[in-house]
Amino acid sequence: MNDMARRADGAPDAASSIEEADKDVAGKAARHRDHPAVRALGAVSEIADQTPLALVCAGVTVAGVLTGRPRLARTGLDMMAAHVLANLIKRAIKNRVRRTRPNKMIEKRTYRFEPDEGQGGDESSFPSGHTAGAVAVATAMACNLPRTSVPVLLAAAVVAGIQVPRAKHYPMDVAAGAVLGLASALVVRAVSSKAWRMVESSQGTMRSLKDR
């Protein structure tokens, strides 16, 4: 238990109790980290790492351009913007908060969760970047292409859910990442929708002027 999560008299407060429960769930789930299914899903979830996810977003954009489907191209751009925004916010938090990853807490029997300059690697558990990226990109796609909602959101849920049993994150890390990803996608959606309306309005005006 770290000092940040205790009162001055040493008695655990509500935040401390939640944190302990978070650690307990992560510890129990981590017992399955070597199961073949967990390893397989964990490997698949790496598509939500920064570079692979950026390539997915770029691929959707390029596919839209090459096939002459503006809506698909815009979807790819929104996905990329949501991914970038989520990543920037996630990195800002990780640089200011240290939290030991579950696998290291179990192996080394050491644990920290406190405001401090981020150390990266084993001390950068909070929030889950894979979850933030996956949720941001999936939400952006679902908003633009509703028919894809079920499969892409299900994929994001799998990416998020597997982070706990593979001992990479605590449930609270995953929840924070999901909120961050969702918020990033909705912000991008709001800004993007307004921007595209302005572009379409401008194009309409230009066509009207040419027809005169």
Image: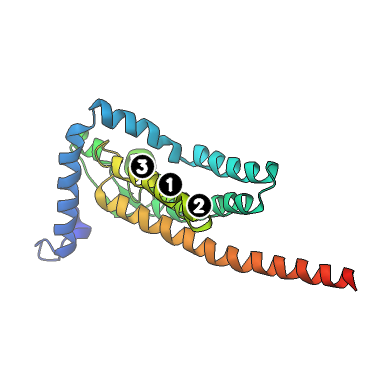
Label 2, label 3: how many angstroms apart (C-alpha)? 16 Å
Q: What residue would you read off at disc 3?
A: 159
Label 3 residue SS:
helix
The structure residue drawn at horizontal position 53% and vertical position 56%, both measured from the top left corner, is: 144
- The structure residue drawn at horizontal position 65% and vertical position 64%, both measured from the top left corner, is 196
Is residue 1 visible in the rendered image? The answer is: no
Q: Which mark is residue 152?
A: 1
Q: Measuring from the top left, give residue 194's x and y in whole percent.
A: 61, 69
Q: Considering depth in this image, is 191 or 167 the residue closer to the camera?
A: 191
Q: Nearer the viewer, mark 3 or mark 1?
A: 1
Q: Quadrant of the C terminus?
A: bottom right
**Left/right of residue 52 with respect to residue 115 in the rendered view:** right
**Label 2: which secondary element:** helix
Mark 2 / mark 1, whichever is N-terminal: 2
* Residue 51, position as x, y percentages in the image: 52, 38
Q: Is residue 209 left or right of residue 152?
A: right
Residue 158: quadrant of the picture: top left
Expressed as whole percent of the image width and height from the top left, the position of residue 175 reads 30, 54
Q: Identify the residue position indicated by label 2 in the image.
A: 141
Mark 1, secondary structure of its residue: helix
